[in-house]
Image: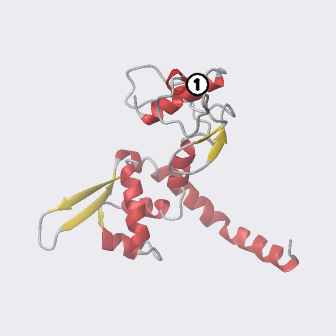
Amino acid sequence: MSRTEGLMAERREAARGGVSSARSAGTGSARGTDTAGAESAMELSSGESGEVAPRGSAPCCAAPAGEGAQAPVFDFDILSPACPSRTVLRHVVDRWTPLVVMVLADGPSRFGELRARVGGVTPKVLTQTLRSMERDGLVTRTQLQGVPPRVDYELTDLGRSLQAPIDALRTWIHTHSAQILAHRESYDAVGP
C-alpha cells in the first residue's frame, strides 16, 4: 500500500470515528503517538506542503473509486487543508507553471529557449518548475545524443489538458486587466 493510499484509509477511518489498525498497533509512520498508541490530534497533511490539519475535519478523499481505474480516483475536497489536491493546485497555479505550459503548447523546447520565452525566470527556478512538472506528469524530459547534448521538454497528454483552462485564464486576464488596474489605482488613491 502506498503512503497516499495509507493516508486515505486513515482519513476514512478517522471520519468514521475509529483508529486505523496500523496506527493503533503502533506501526506505520505516525507523526505523534502517546504511550497507548493513540493518534495525535494533528497530522501533517502532505509531507511536502507542511500544512497541518486537525484529524476528522472536512473528510477528504474518503471514497476511492472502484477497481480497474488507471489511477486511484478519490473524492477530493480542495477546500480542506488536509486534502492532497491542495498541493496539485499550488503546483498548477504557481507563478511559472502556466507560463511554461503556454510556451510548451507550441511544441517541444530546450531549456534555453524556454528561459528566453518565459521572461524573468531564473535558471534555478525554471529547473525547479520543470522538475516539479515532470514529477507531476505534466512534461517529459528527453535527453538527445549529440554534441553538445540536447535536452527537450514537451507537454504530456496530462500537461496538454491544462492548455484550455490556462488559455481561458489568459483570455480573462487580457479582457479584464485594464479594469483591474483602474480599480487598483482608485483603491490606492483612497487607501484601505
- Residue 174 position, x and y percent, is 60, 66
Placement of the N terminus among the 4 image quadrants: top left
- Residue drawn at (23%, 57%), measured in percent from left and top? 142
- Dot 1 crowding, Cα within 10 Å, few <14, some 14–19, many 20+: many
- Residue 152 position, x and y percent, is 26, 62
Residue lying furthest bottom: 189
- Residue 181 position, x and y percent, is 71, 73
Q: Which of 66 and 50 is in front in this view?
A: 50
- Residue drawn at (67%, 36%), measured in percent from left and top? 41
Residue 9, above or below 148 = above
Q: Quadrant of residue 178?
A: bottom right
Residue 138, above or below 60 = below
Q: Is residue 95 shown left or right of residue 180? A: left
Q: Which of 71 and 46 is in front in this view?
A: 46
Q: In which quarter of the image is residue 182?
A: bottom right
- At label 1, which amino acid type do we have? Arg
In the picture of the structure, the residue carrying the numbered disc 1 is 12
